[in-house]
Image (cartoon, grey):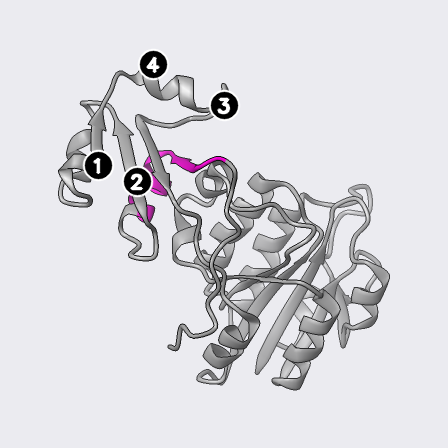
């Protein structure tokens, strides 16, 4: 797979700190991460043996890690200072799709919560999603909370950030993708959708759903068959359901 399209992440004012066992171990095994240093406790140090140069490893008291992270962060004795992941260009995702007869993508339209996105990344990885596409302007940068919620799968799933989502959807159509939007008022339920060929699923924000221009770009829409007394599900839960259904081919 060519990496000529790959772009560097936007530099952050503060360093990226990943925390939690799965997120840190996955990052250490990813050659695309540049590691500055790892803080861990004496109890957790044996788990990272051989995964980074010894001079980048610092054994510290758990309280030292607590001071670095938000109060609610569950770090499990790990705090890793590293670079964010580089972004995949849409052209690169299309190149990967060209090698497959059947595949699916997930597109998020203005989903902004890092933990929701992390959980969605985990579902994408679990159900063989080719890539996750987000709009650069209205989605958060990679964070420790996002990586933790993904349980480290952020290091194995291609993420593609695009400037113009409607233009990206058109590029995907030109590349042979069928575009399906999630809409609570759609006539077709998720279990009845066509799963063959190349499919891109679009999910909007929990409050407003898909924006009008994005929805108009869809070839069809689907909904989850739900109890009428329940208005909606969390976007990460809904994503897991539709990706599971797509993976049942």
Give the extent of the magenta segment: 14-27
Residue placed most toward the observer, 140 or 202: 140
Residue placed most toward the observer, 68 or 133: 68
Q: Earlier in the sequence, mark 1 or mark 4?
A: 1
Q: Earlier in the sequence, mark 1 or mark 2?
A: 2
- Quarter occupied by residue 147: top left
Residue at (51%, 73%) from the top-left corner? 93
Pointer 1 residue: 56
Q: Earlier in the sequence, mark 3 or mark 2?
A: 2
Label ID, residue 63: 4
Q: Earlier in the sequence, mark 4 or mark 3?
A: 4
- Alpha carbon distance from label 3 to label 2: 20 Å
Q: Quadrant of the N terminus?
A: bottom left
Helix, strand or loop status at disc 4: helix
Pointer 3 residue: 70
Residue at (64%, 51%) from the top-left corner? 238
Relative height, residue 72 to residue 121 (above, below): above
Query: Is residue 123 in view from this perspective?
Result: yes
Q: Earlier in the sequence, mark 1 or mark 3?
A: 1
Pointer 2 residue: 36
The percent position of residue 84, horizontal first and vertical second, equals 44, 48
Relative height, residue 63 to residue 145 (above, below): above
The percent position of residue 196, horizontal first and vertical second, equals 58, 81
The percent position of residue 222, horizontal first and vertical second, equals 74, 65
């Amino acid at each position: 797979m060519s990496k000529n399209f790959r772009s560097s992440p936007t530099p952050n004012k503060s360093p990226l700190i990943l925390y939690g066992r799965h997120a840190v171990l996955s990052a250490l095994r990813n050659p695309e991460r540049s590691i500055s240093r790892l803080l861990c406790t004496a109890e957790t140090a044996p788990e990272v043996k051989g995964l980074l140069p010894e001079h980048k490893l610092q054994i510290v008291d758990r309280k030292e890690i607590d001071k670095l992270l938000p109060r609610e962060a569950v770090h499990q004795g790990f705090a890793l200072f590293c670079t964010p992941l580089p972004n995949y260009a849409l052209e690169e995702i299309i190149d990967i799709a060209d090698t497959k007869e059947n595949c699916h993508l997930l597109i998020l339209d203005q989903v902004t919560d890092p933990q929701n996105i992390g959980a969605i990344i985990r579902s994408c990885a679990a159900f063989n999603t080719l890539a996750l596409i987000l709009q650069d302007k209205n989605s958060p940068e990679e964070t420790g909370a996002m990586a933790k919620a993904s349980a480290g799968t952020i290091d194995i799933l291609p993420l593609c950030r695009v400037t113009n989502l409607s233009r990206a959807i058109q590029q995907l159509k030109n590349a042979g993708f069928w575009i399906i939007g999630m809409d609570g008022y759609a006539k077709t339920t998720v279990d009845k959708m066509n799963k063959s060929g190349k499919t891109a699923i679009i999910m909007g924000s929990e409050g407003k759903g898909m924006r009008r221009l994005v929805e108009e770009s869809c070839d069809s829409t689907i909904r989850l068959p739900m109890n009428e007394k329940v208005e909606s599900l969390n976007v990460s839960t809904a994503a897991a359901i539709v990706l599971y259904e797509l993976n049942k081919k």
